[in-house]
Image (tube, rainbow, N blue to C red):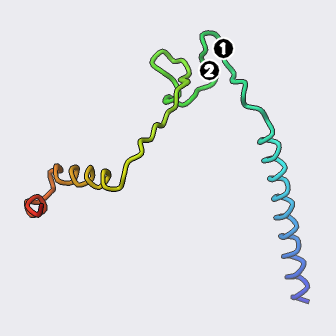
Amino acid sequence: MLHLLYILAFTTLAIVAVTNLIRSLITLSADSQRSFSQMPVSNGGRFRGVPHPELLDEAGNFVNEPLLVMKSMTVEDAREQLDALYKSSPGATNEVRDEE
């Protein structure tokens, strides 16, 4: 009798979990189909909501520039820059400076 109660309880929990999973997938699908190309703007090109401060310039207008620019470098260049930073730090010992 106790086995049937466990089976019934876990079956109920499994049905609730699968139902919530399906509901979440439907909600996620509906949100991904929404178009975000039209930004809500009011007068002067400012947002109605509160955008992140990094997306705005000093005047409060939206920045249309790339926010991340990466420079390619070799491993040796990166190693040299890290070594220079380490050697110039106040905690660097004289032994490390004398090795080279």
* Residue 13, image quadrant: bottom right
Closer to us: 33 or 77: 77
Q: How many marks?
A: 2
As measured in the structure, the alpha-carbon distance from the residue carrying label 2 to the one carrying label 1 is 6 Å
Q: Residue at x 62, y 20 (%)?
A: 47
Q: Check the image and report above or below for 2 versus 37.
A: below
* Residue 39, image quadrant: top right
Closer to us: 38 or 12: 38
* Disc marking residue 11: none
Q: Check the image and report above or below for 96 versus 9.
A: above
* Disc marking residue 42: 1
Quadrant, the N terminus: bottom right
Q: Which residue is mark 2?
A: 47
Kind of element beneath mark 2: loop
Q: Check the image and report above or below for 58 versus 87.
A: above
Left or right of 21: which side holds 63? left
Left or right of 59: which side holds 99? left
Q: Residue at x 18, y 50 (%)?
A: 89
Q: Amino acid at mark 1?
A: Ser
Closer to us: 87 or 42: 87
Q: Position of residue 20 (x, y in %)?
A: 82, 58
Quadrant, the C terminus: bottom left
* Residue 41, image quadrant: top right
Left or right of 85: which side holds 24? right
Left or right of 89: which side holds 69? right
Q: Residue at x 30, y 51 (%)?
A: 77
Is mark 2 in CB contact (under 8 Å) with mark 1? yes
Q: Residues within 10 Å of mark 1 (few under 14, many from 20)?
A: few
Q: Position of residue 9 (x, y in %)?
A: 86, 76
* Lower position in the chain sequence, tag 2 or tag 1: 1
Q: Residue furthest top?
A: 43
